[in-house]
Image (cartoon, helix red, strand yellow):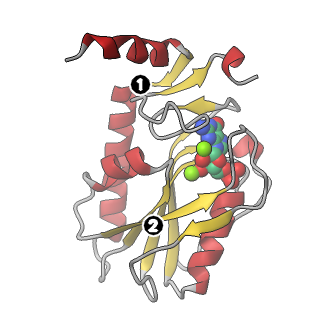
Amino acid sequence: RNASHKPFLLAMHSHIERILWSEDQISRRVSELAAEISADFGGQSPAPVVVGVATGAFLFLADLVRKIDLSIAVDFVRVESYGFGTVSNGAPTISFDLKVDVNARHVIVVEDIVDTGHTLSKVIGHLKSKGVSSVSVCTFLDKPARRKVHFQLLGEGKYYRGFECPDYFVVGYGLDFAELYRNLPYIGVLKPELYK
Ligand code: 5GP
Ligand code: MG
Ligand code: MG
């Protein structure tokens, strides 16, 4: 390993004021969610399509699907809403669409975090227009205190969440600040001087 990489690694971790969920806690919770989903969808044919919301959901999705014992399809949509700030602009758009045909399929939307709810409402509306049979949501984090839009699951859809998140701007495990910190293996709170 090249020793010159070390200062960058240290620099990333040193930007974190505190860790909310460790790698071990995350891994245990993801296993529980995967077991619930495997049980809930076990009897259904065809198996669901798992749709990750890029980029934030990539690590959660990768960990989750490897623990789901069903022959699922996996795809992504990209939704633009945040730019480089920490506050949603309230009008997300779909900037990259699915490849898999989800018509008459059960879909599980995998999100990193549900905050105001704007992104999820947009994604659910988009899936509805494609004629899905149901939409479930599996979000790693949920910040109910900041909800502005009430989204509705479709059909027999279920809601799964990893953890309820306090009202901090968190990073890691896929969640970014200005596209950085997604590769932190845990969820942490950035030192305020880094974004204020
Ligand atoms: P919403 O549209 O529900 O307000 O926000 C959804 C998106 O905003 C999330 O998928 C995520 O990308 C971003 N977001 C919301 N809260 C946070 C947060 O605390 N930290 C980070 N890094 N991103 C967040
Ligand atoms: Mg997201
Ligand atoms: Mg972001």
Task: Point out residue 49 in the picture as x, y percentages from the top left corner.
Answer: 38, 72
Q: Please rate how many residues cluster around mark 2, counting C-alpha atoms within 10 Å: few if below 14, some from 14 to 19, many from 20.
A: many
Identify residue for label 1.
22
Task: Point out residue 155 in the picture as x, y percentages from the top left corner.
Answer: 55, 80
Residue at 46% x, 88% y is 103
Q: Nearer the viewer, residue 72 or 95?
A: 95
- Left or right position of 137 against 35: right
Q: Nearer the viewer, residue 114 or 17?
A: 17
Q: Amino acid at mark 2?
A: Ile
Residue at 61% x, 71% y is 124
36 is higher (above) or lower (below) than 96: above
Residue at 36% x, 44% y is 30
Q: Quadrant of residue 178?
A: top right
- Left or right position of 147 against 19: right
Q: Please rate how many residues cluster around mark 1, counting C-alpha atoms within 10 Å: few if below 14, some from 14 to 19, many from 20.
A: few
50 is higher (above) or lower (below) than 104: above
